[in-house]
Image (tube, rainbow, N blue to C red):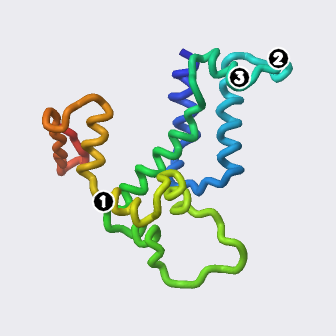
Amino acid sequence: MKLRLTQCYIWSSLLYGCETWSLTPTLEKKLRSFEMWTYRRLGRISWKEKKTNKAVLNMFGLKSTSLMSTVRKRITRYYGHIRRHNSIQKSLVERMVEGTRGRGRKRTNWVDNVTRYAGIGINDCARKAMDRKRVANRSLQRHGRHRTAVKVKVVWYMRRNYFFYL
């Protein structure tokens, strides 16, 4: 019960807006450390007890940490959303903004994170993001539904700007 409440209240507050984060290895390490610290606090495990992270995860019935995988999943989903819509965000991601880059080492940027998480180049990421039907079918198959059995239809409710999935 504690774990579900933590995931509901703490993770949702922590991960607000994580789709736009440019994650560096240092920030990833801090997020993993925070997740383990939270689990230790939930289990009332003191640092003096010298329990390993695996032992703490086993105590809660978890196989591994999930916070970073959630962040990666949200970032890649948001990239697909940006690529499918014409907006200022799309032109920023495509680097179509005028101007010159400043001096010094290039900072870790968001697009580099997307390519690192996907494991393929940015052009292949863009091509896959545009194929929305394939992504939806893969999602349906992952959840044990057939492509032909479930048809997803989006209905736009004009007055309140809501999407309904039927």
Image-based side of 153 in relation to 123, left or right:
left
Nearer the observer: mark 1 or 3; the answer is: 1
Which residue position holds label 2?
Answer: 49
**The C terminus lies in quadrant:** top left
| Tally of numbered discs | 3
Which badge, 1 or 3, comes first in the chain's sequence?
3
Which residue position holds label 3?
Answer: 41
**Residue name at image x 67 percent, y 28 percent:** 38
Residue that extends furthest to the bottom in the rendered view of this protein: 99
The amino acid type of the residue labelled 1 equals: Met
Mark 3 element type: helix
**Residue name at image x 51 percent, y 46 percent:** 72
Task: Tell me if residue 149 comes above or below residue 47 in the rendering.
Answer: below
**Mark sitting on residue 145:** none
- Give the Cα distance between marks 3 and 2: 13 Å
Which residue position holds label 1?
Answer: 130
Q: Nearer the viewer, residue 46 or 106?
A: 106
Image-based side of 91 in relation to 161, left or right:
right
List x then y, in percent, for residue 18: 53, 48
Classed neighbour count for the residue bearing mark 1: other residues with Cα under 10 Å, few (<14), some (14–19), many (≥20): some
Mark 2 element type: helix
List x then y, in percent, for residue 95: 47, 74
**Residue name at image x 14 percent, y 33 percent:** 149
- Give the Cα distance between marks 1 and 3: 43 Å
The amino acid type of the residue labelled 2 equals: Glu
